[in-house]
Image (cartoon, grey):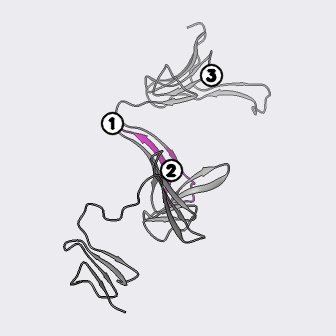
Amino acid sequence: QKLHVAGGLSISQSSAGQIGSVFEAPTQAVQTLRFDSQRFRFWAGGSERLTILSASGNVGIGTSTPDANLDIEDSSVAEVRVKDSAGTGYVRIQHNGTTGFIGTEGAVGFNLLTNGSERVSILSGGNVGIGTTSPSSPLTVQGDISASDGTRTLHYDVSGNELNAGGATFHINKSNGVDTSFDNGTLYVDASANRVSIGAGTAPGEALEVVG
């Protein structure tokens, strides 16, 4: 080499050394930096570890040809962890070659935000909240609920306590053969006998039995 420095090397703007570059003497295998017209390469342990492409500015970890602003690759499991050093868990983004994961490790929840507001909250115990950050059941929705296939619609209006269907006939237990009870048995449909009870209990003796 034209210049060979045995030990550390410091290149600085001032004698105090606040601005510049410091290249420490390697303590394990080979550590070096490489520049060329296409990329800026960081090597450690004899392998290229990080690459910055000159043209795009894309950064690659585990790859010398990053296709995104930050491209992380690994031969087995590629993973990114974000952790508060004072916290008890961390956020993990992982891909193991067949499946991708986004979530948390440890007793911490996971929230999805849009426009700076929390929209979906998953507690560490697994409860999921939509529109609420404190779901009390496996799925808690704060607000109205709608479902549609483009033709038929089903909408539950929480404030009006109304369930409305549109686009086609609304069926309850159309084909599963299970009895149906309304208002704690005030209206009861015996599916096996095709009988209806109004105030007559759960075993109507006629096609329509009314008591009261």
Q: What residue range appears in magenta?
A: 81-98
Q: Which SS class for mark 2?
A: strand
- Disc 2 marks a residue whose amino acid type is Val
Q: CA distance from mark 3 to mark 2?
A: 26 Å
Q: Say which residue label 3 marks.
A: 57
Q: Is residue 206 above or below residue 78?
A: below
Which quadrant holds the N terminus? top right
Which quadrant holds the C terminus? bottom left
Q: Which SS class for mark 3?
A: loop
The single residue placed furthest to the right in the displayed view is 14
Report x, y in % for residue 119: 58, 55
Was residue 96 drawn as part of the magenta stretch in this picture? Answer: yes
Report x, y in % for residue 72: 48, 31
Q: Say which residue label 2 marks.
A: 91
The disc at residue 98 is 1
- Disc 1 marks a residue whose amino acid type is Thr
Residue depicted at x 37% and y 83%: 184
Q: Is residue 94 above or below residue 175?
A: above
The tag earlier along the polypeptide, 3 or 2, is 3
Q: Is residue 148 above or below residue 4?
A: below
